[in-house]
């Protein structure tokens, strides 16, 4: 059985779970829905896991995929933004806009993230 850390504020969907079963066979999902300050928090949360499935900003992903920091696979969910056919009012703008739902589109292994910055 493969134990997977799910680091996200969102609940994993049935489609995501089914797809992980397709990829890894029998799985156990450990949910961690707290904020993290950096890669060390993720590694600590997933110490007893085989795979780290995460929703994180690029800077933390870059550190987490660095082999000096972590050797476990890091994966993230892909999603398609699909129009529902409904119109809603955006509470931030007060304007009508198309409503969308997110549809699971697979998993991807994060091999490397390169963050390049330039001081302004």
Image: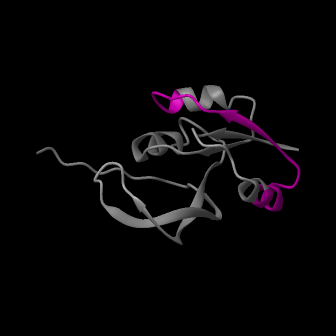
Residue 73, magenta (yes or no) = no
Total labels: the figure holds 0
Could you tell whether 85 is left or right of 50 in the image? left
Q: Residue at x 56, y 28 (%)?
A: 34
Q: Which of 42 and 10 is in front in this view?
A: 10
Q: Which quarter of the rendering shows the C terminus? A: top left
Splitting the image into 4 quarters, where does residue 28 fall? Answer: top right
Q: Where is residue 87 in the image (x, y as percent from the top left)?
A: 44, 67
| Residue 80 against residue 67 in the figure, above or below | below
Q: Which residue is drawn at 69% across and 35% down?
A: 31
Q: Which of 100 and 59 is in front in this view?
A: 100
| Residue 55 against residue 83 in the figure, above or below | above
Q: Which of 12 and 97 is in front in this view?
A: 97
Q: Which of 12 and 116 is in front in this view?
A: 12
Q: Which residue is drawn at 63% across and 41% down?
A: 71
Q: Which residue is drawn at 66% across and 41% down?
A: 6
Q: Where is residue 116 in the image (x, y as percent from the top left)?
A: 29, 51
Could you tell whether 27 is left or right of 97 in the image? right
Q: In this view, which residue lies farthest toward the left?
A: 120
What range of the chain is rendered magenta? 18-40
Residue 31, magenta (yes or no) = yes
Q: Which quarter of the rendering shows the N terminus? A: top right
Q: Position of residue 108 (x, y in %)?
A: 61, 60
Splitting the image into 4 quarters, where does residue 109 fall? Answer: bottom right
């Amino acid at each position: 059985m493969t134990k997977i850390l799910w680091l996200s504020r969102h609940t994993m969907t049935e489609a995501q779970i089914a797809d992980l079963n397709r990829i890894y066979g029998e799985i156990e999902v450990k949910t961690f829905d707290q904020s993290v300050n950096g890669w060390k928090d993720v590694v600590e949360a997933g110490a007893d896991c085989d795979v780290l499935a995460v929703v994180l900003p690029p800077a933390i992903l870059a550190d987490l995929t660095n082999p000096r920091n972590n050797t476990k696979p890091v994966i993230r969910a892909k999603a398609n933004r699909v129009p529902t056919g409904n119109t809603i009012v955006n509470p931030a703008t007060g304007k009508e806009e198309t409503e969308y739902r997110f549809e699971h589109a697979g998993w991807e292994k994060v091999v490397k993230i390169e963050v390049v910055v330039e001081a302004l």
